[in-house]
Each structure stands twice: as structure tokens, then as C-alpha cells.
Amino acid sequence: MMSVSEAVRARRSTRAFIDKPVSANLLRSILEAAARSPSGGNLQPWNVYVMVGDDLAELKKKTLDNLKGAREGGEFKVYPDQLPDTFNARRKKNGEDLYASIKVPREDKAGRLQQFARNYEFFGAPVGLIFAIDRCFDKPQWVHLGMFIQTVMLLAEEAGLGTCAQEAWSAWPKTVSAHLGLPPNLVVYCGMSLGYADLAHPINNFTTDRVPVEEFTTFRGF
Ligand SMILES: Cc1cc2nc3c(=O)[nH]c(=O)nc-3n(C[C@H](O)[C@H](O)[C@H](O)COP(=O)(O)O)c2cc1C
């Protein structure tokens, strides 16, 4: 079995999948284990919606249809309006690496948009998840939801599955909420594509950068 560090190192965002279903039992066992994630006060502020088959197809169709019209607008900002240069550079590089992997050049706006729209097909994954959180919660509980999401991704990795977390889904809160019948107290944070990775696809074969430990850590008293 994979060690935690092997799962951490092996995980990468998977944006192409093979046509192989994921069993309900496996999905349930991943979520059951992920529920062991820590949360302040043990509030466990996560809500997960797991879609396959016709239900998944319906949400994809509704959202792809929406792309032809006016944007709904998200309920929160995924990025600040003014990203400081350091972060802007990282974001840009990430986009460049992604599009280079599938040979979409910088000037090919239509090609980039087409690839971005794949978000709303859950990148062809057999399973789509939506993570939602109660509106009463502030930053701390959103962090706890994030810990839960990362645990889901690592457990999926251990089970031989690929994942891609997708804040792109937060751009269509009305569509997603209506489709899932979300109670009004829940806000959609993000989605996740999940399935068996298409390992031969170039989009799954580039490695994203990371800044070195020294850049984000201050060691003191050693
Ligand atoms: C919460 C969250 C939301 C994300 N949203 C998207 C998304 O909407 N679309 C996408 O293609 N990638 C998305 N990503 C993937 C990031 O781009 C990716 O994690 C980052 O570039 C690092 O690459 P890696 O996951 O392959 O290590 C998201 C990641 C996280 C953690």
C-alpha cells in the first residue's frame, strides 16, 4: 500500500480520464476515511455531493449550455482583484505549463477557452463531486473543508484514482445549487473531477512548480 508521502508526491491534478466507472463502495470508503480529517471544534463543516451517470450528465449539460449566455457570477472571489506580482507570476506560469502540455499556444484564445470549458465536463471524469459549506462559517471552517478535500484527494490517489479540485464550479452557484437542490444555507465552494486517470494523455504529464521550503518557511531557534 502507498505510504502517505508516496500519495502526496504522486498526486497531481488529473484532467483526462479513462472510461471506467468507480464503484459506489470505493467512493463511500474514501469519504468515510476522509471524515477522519481534523476540524476545529470537530465541527466537520463539509457537505459532499457525489454525481455519476445521468445526474452528472445533466449538470454538465446545463452548465455547458450556460456558457453560451450571461455569466452567473460567483458568490465569492476565487482570487483577489489585484494579485500581488509574486502570485500573479505563479498563476501565469501554471496556466502556461498547462496549455503547453496540450500544445495550445498563448495566442490561441479559443483553444484556451475550449480547454477551460472542459472544467464543466468534469474533464470527462466518471464521477463529479461538489463540496459545499454552511454560510454561517468564516475562514476557519473553510480551511477545515480544505483539509477534508485534500484528504479525499490523497485517499483517491492511494486507491489508484486521479482527481482535480475545481474552483471553476463556484462560478455557477445558481445552476449547481438548483441541480443539487441545495438548501439555502449552503454555498458551493468547489467541485472535483474523480476517476481513473488517462495516463497517456499529455495534460496529465506535466509537473507543476513549487517554491523551495526556504521561501515560505522561517526556521528559528535551531
Ligand atoms: C481548491 C482548488 C481548486 C482548483 N480549481 C481548479 C479548477 O477550477 N480548474 C483546474 O483545472 N484546476 C484547478 N485546481 C488545480 C490547481 O491548478 C493545481 O492544484 C495546481 O496547479 C498545482 O498542480 P497539481 O495539483 O498538479 O500539483 C484547483 C486546485 C485546488 C486545490
Image: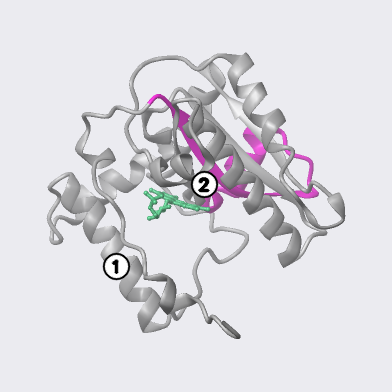
Residue 144 at x, y percent in the picture:
71, 55
On the image, numbered disc 1 is attached to which residue? 92
Quarter assignment of residue 89:
bottom left
Residue labelled 2 has its Cβ within 8 Å of some atom of ligand 1: yes
Stretch of the chain drawn in magenta: 169-196
Quarter assignment of residue 141:
bottom right
Front in this rendered view, residue 101 or 29: 29
Task: Name the element at disc 2.
Answer: helix
Q: Classify mark 1: residues with Cα within 10 Å, few (<14), some (14-19) or many (20+).
A: few
Residue at figure coordinates x 56%, y 34% from the top left: 155
Front in this rendered view, residue 106 or 95: 95
Estimate the spatial distance between the alpha carbons at disc 2 and disc 1, rounded to whole Å.
Answer: 20 Å
Residue at figure coordinates x 26%, y 44% from the top left: 114
Residue 107 at x, y percent in the picture:
13, 61
Q: Is residue 187 left or right of residue 13?
A: right
Q: Is residue 110 visible?
A: no
Q: Which mark is residue 47?
A: none
On the image, numbered disc 2 is attached to which residue? 169
Q: Amino acid at mark 1?
A: Lys
Residue 133 at x, y percent in the picture:
73, 49
192 within the magenta span: yes
